[in-house]
Amino acid sequence: MDITALRQRLGDIVREEEGSDVDWGAVKRMCETLYQDLDGQPDLDCPHIVFHFLSDADIRAKDADYGRGQRVEVRRFVETGQCNDSKPGPAWGCAAALAALGALLYLLLR
C-alpha cells in the first residue's frame, strides 16, 4: 500500500461516517481491516493521527464532537496529504526548551 491508497481508504471511512445513516459496524470493520493492512507496512510513513482514527471508531460512534475533531484532521490528510500530526519533533528542540527552562529557574532561584 502507498500513501495514495491509504488516503483513498481513509476517505471511504470518513464518507461512511458522514453519511445520513451511519453503519458503525461497517465503519469498525473498515477501520480494523485498514489497521491490519497498515501493520504489514512498516516502511509506510503513516501519520500518527491515522492510527488513533482507526482505533477510535467506537468512541466516535458515542461522542459526535470527538468524531468531528478526528474527521477534520483525517480529512485534511485525505485531501492534501498533510496533517497536524503529533509526531515528536527533533531532539534538539526538547534540549533547547529544557535549557531555557533551566536558565529561567536559575534566574528565579538566585
Image (cartoon, rainbow, N blue to C red):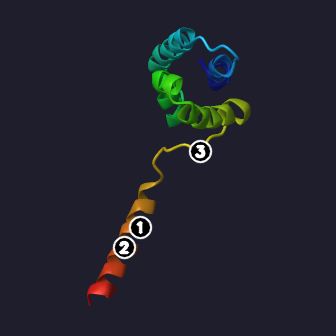
Q: Residue at x 63, y 20 (%)?
A: 17
Report if the CB atoms under discs 2 and 3 are less than 8 Å apart: no
Disc 2 and disc 3: Cα gap in Å? Answer: 26 Å
- Which numbered dot is residue 101? 2
Q: Is residue 47 visible in the rendered structure shown here?
A: no
Residue 13 image position (x, y, % from top left): 62, 18
The residue carrying pointer 1 sits among few (fewer than 14), some (14 to 19) or many (20 or more) residues within 10 Å by Cα, namely few
Query: If the image is split into quadrants, where does the N terminus sit?
Result: top right
Give the mark nearer the N terminus: 1 vs 3: 3
Kind of residue sitting beneath label 3: Asn
Name the outermost residue toward the right.
79
Q: Residue at x 48, y 14 (%)?
A: 32
Kind of residue sitting beneath label 2: Leu
Q: Residue at x 49, y 25 (%)?
A: 62
In screen coordinates, is 98 left or right of 9? left
Residue 99: image quadrant is bottom left
Kind of residue sitting beneath label 1: Ala
Residue 101: image quadrant is bottom left
Residue under label 1? 97
Whether 31 is drawn above or below 46: the answer is above
In screen coordinates, is 104 left or right of 66? left
Report if the CB atoms under discs 1 and 2 are less than 8 Å apart: yes
The residue carrying pointer 2 sits among few (fewer than 14), some (14 to 19) or many (20 or more) residues within 10 Å by Cα, namely few
Residue under label 3? 84
Give the mark nearer the N terminus: 2 vs 3: 3
Give the secondary structure at mark 3.
Answer: loop
Residue 97 image position (x, y, % from top left): 41, 67
- Which numbered dot is residue 39? none
